Image: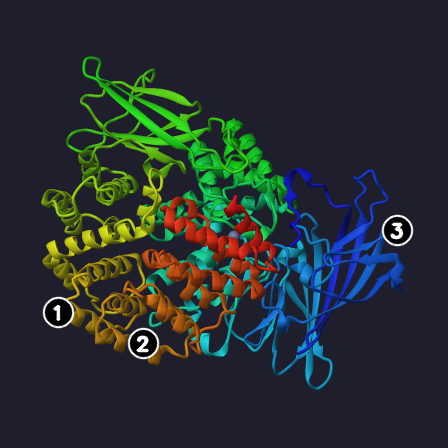
Amino acid sequence: MEKPEVKYLKDYRPPAYWIDNTELNFDLQETNTLVKSVLNIRRNNDLSDKTIPLVLDGKNLELLFVKIDKKHLDSDKYQINSENLTIYDVPESFSLEVTTKIQPQNNTSLEGLYKAGGIFCTQCEAEGFRKITYFPDRPDVMSKYSCTITADREKYPILLSNGNLINSGMTDQNRHWAQWEDPFKKPSYLFALVAGDLVYIEDFYKTKSGRSVTLRIYVEHMNIDKCGHAMQSLKKAMKWDEDVFGLEYDLDIYMIVAVNDFNMGAMENKGLNIFNSKYVLAKPETATDIDFWNIERVIAHEYFHNWTGNRVTLKNWFQLSLKEGLTVFRDQEFSSDMTSRPVKRISDVRSLRSFQFPEDAGPMAHPVRPESYIEMDNFYTMTVYEKGAEIIRMIHRILGKQGFRKGMNLYFKRHDGQAVTTEDFVKAMEDANQADLRQFRLWYSQAGTPEISVKRAYNHKNKTYSMTFTQKCPPSPGMSEKKAMHIPVAVGLLDKAGNDMPLQLAGQDKPEGTTILLNLYKTTQTFEFVNVYEPPVPSILRGFSAPVKLRAEYTSREQAFLLANDSDEFHRWDSGQRFFAGTMINMVQGKIKNHDPDVLGAIIEPFRKTLLSTELDKAFISHVLTLPSESELGILISETAPIDPELIHQVRRFITHAIAKALKNDFERIYQDNQEKGLYNIDAESIARRSLKNLALSYLGMLETPEIIKIACNQFNKAENMTDEIAALGVLSHIQCSEREKAIDDFYQKWKSDTLVLDKWFAIQAGSQIPGIIDKIKELLNHPDFSIKNPNKVRALVSSFCGMNPWQFHHISGNGYKFMTDRILELNAINPQIAARMAGIFNHWKKYEPSRQKLMKAELEKIINTPDISRHVYEIVSKALV
Ligand code: B3K
Ligand code: ZN
């Protein structure tokens, strides 16, 4: 194939033409859909060159007519190729009418306008609008849209687009139309259209200034009883944004549509969010506690985009983190306020370390503001989203809550209605606080995870304690030298009794609290504390104040001490994880013997103490007692040695089994004590109780005794909520017994008409630890309820296998790898975005031991040598092979 073009930030140029108004007209049909667009175009007079032709983006479109100021344009006046429509010699301002023909029913990429499950819907971000009509498909061209949709009345009774419904009517007996108008200017990526046989629930929200907003959630008929939680979440999010940021919703109606076929979680189209049904539909019988939380989070995230993304949008796609990092930070804060702040922080950091850190150390490593891309869709990454949110969180910490709010206010005051950059954001934060974030900006431009090491020394005579921090950042693709960054490190000191010491830095006249923010600016920097009455144990990087790898060289005794005593719950959890991980890694590396009773005792005692604590929050206990996963252990090991997934699997299994055996009675008691009492509830406390109970069950499951199988079957059969039902099925899924087969069968029979619940059924089987499960997975590919065209099904069956079952995916036969390559190639032709996501599974091939490296490399080569490989997949695989 030809090498695809690389786009660079440094090549950014302002648009040559503005589009003041966009009038769209859709004639939706079963075979050919006609799209007519009328654009009011005006030359950008800021540019000195007045001869630049008008270049519009367009892909997979059949051009029917072009008119300028209502007159047909002869075909020698324009040029079309597979990417653009170019018109030469256009007036300074004019109206352009373009009519194109598309086939949404054949569009399996789920980008642009597509029809799936009988519903027409759109996904335009990042560059999907160009699959609908010719347009300057870039976020800095903001236009006012109106949209008229005509369709069969019976098949598509609901016709929606952005903004307000202006008018509607019938064209003949069978076809009807609706006209929508969005009063706010927006980039093309926020355009949306939906047409289908849907029903809705309706509610209202009164904004703080007293306006009433209509809220609607549209779903397929059979799901009407599963929208309540999403609606409550939306109202909570609207209220929270008013309370915390003073931000109010701006249109009279807010609509959410749930569809089953969707590439990602959801999309923030102005006034008309389109959601993967997974993040809308829930009732206790069908959705787990985690699902309920995720729905609340994603509904809030898309709602928050209305200000951070829609009203203030992006100048170009390199700025993606301007909206995504900021909006993730906002949704994290929202979830923290709705649930438990430390627990939320723990799970966010866990996922940052499991996915973003490896990304930042691999072939796809890129700065939070990338400098180049081949296919923008490949840059909706953990780095842009989650590391981007960490950057915002550091600014929040450095400036404080009020300073941050002042910065946000100034940002909106300056930039409402504009397309701007991350630089504009940082500038607003600086100007509102007279702060200096010059060095801090490196977080946007330098890829890679900084590593911090700490040397500490206590001076008995002077009662001083010094901490010397050294930072370095490993090289990343295209960036070998890194500059020292501004890193905020929150620190506390514990005395022997486990209490926080008052902290006084040399030069301060009195102690200032028990947690202090140390700002690192240099490669090496020393801080000295005075009046430290005894040698302390430091608690470093409290609350995970910066996205860095900390090499603090704690002894395991110190780790156990911090696990038992640290007042910072995040750091307490983190110390526990390091402690458990350290022991397991030593076993993997043969530094300690598996069966050494002292080693086991050293793990089991703190484990038991935490399990039986009556003071700690149960959700927190569950997090502490969830041992680092096989993948997490692999990531840690890969920093010093190659990964052997089989060995890691054996050690982790051995440890969990040993814990289960030693604490059997305790687990049984916890299991009994935390049974559901009274009505099912989804408040934080009930969720915590269920998670601890099900954690106990999963440890007990390791014992695989008839007694435990009976307990699990009992829970499975009696469960009245999906959390308990799927937890029990999960436990059974790993045990080879007839009860397992029966439970899997029963579950299918019970839920075969609920596609979202079936995703869980596929995922549980893909994650099963029974050896040779890959054969079952291959069989399931042919199951009538599986479809390779449905991204949720692919994620459930195929991605879960790689994610939940690393030792079988990495089986030394190479069968797991071959299986993945087959799926990637199959999807390459159907849905390149999803294919590219899956291809990323081979990104870390160099971190494995030699035989697996060789096998994975061969797969990558096979993929890249396949004819017709998409740009999406090419970008990922070619980078992995460098
Ligand atoms: N902005 C969308 C993601 C679009 C992904 C395009 N490939 C959802 C979100 O982050 O809110
Ligand atoms: Zn987002």
Residue 855 at what x, y percent from top left?
A: 42, 53
Query: Does the Cβ of the disc 2 residue fall within 8 Å of ligand 1?
Result: no
Query: Of marks 1 and 2, which one's residue comes earlier in the chain?
Result: 1
* Residue at the disc numbered 3: 89
In this rendering, is residue 308 above or below 110?
above
In the rendered image, the quadrant that contains the N terminus is: bottom right
Residue 827 at what x, y percent from top left?
A: 53, 64
Tell me, yes or no, if residue 238 can be seen here. no
| 559 lies left or right of 72 | left
In this rendering, is residue 317 above or below 816?
above
Of 243 and 647, which appears nearest the observer? 647
Query: Of marks 3 and 1, which one's residue comes earlier in the chain?
Result: 3
Q: Residue furthest top?
A: 461
* Residue at the disc numbered 2: 747
Residue 462 at what x, y percent from top left?
A: 22, 13
| 646 lies left or right of 703 | right
Type of amino acid at the residue the image marks with label 3: Asp
- Residue at image position (40%, 31%) is 488
Count up the numbered dots: 3
Tell me, yes or no, if residue 603 can be seen here. yes
Q: Nearer the viewer, mark 3 or mark 1?
A: 1
* Residue at the disc numbered 1: 707
Label 3–label 1 contact, CB within 8 A: no
Query: Of marks 2 and 3, which one's residue comes earlier in the chain?
Result: 3
Q: Quadrant of residue 720?
A: bottom left
Residue 726 at what x, y percent from top left?
A: 30, 68
Of 782 and 574, which appears nearest the observer? 782
**Mark 1 nearby-residue class (10 Å; few <14, some 14–19, many ≥20):** few
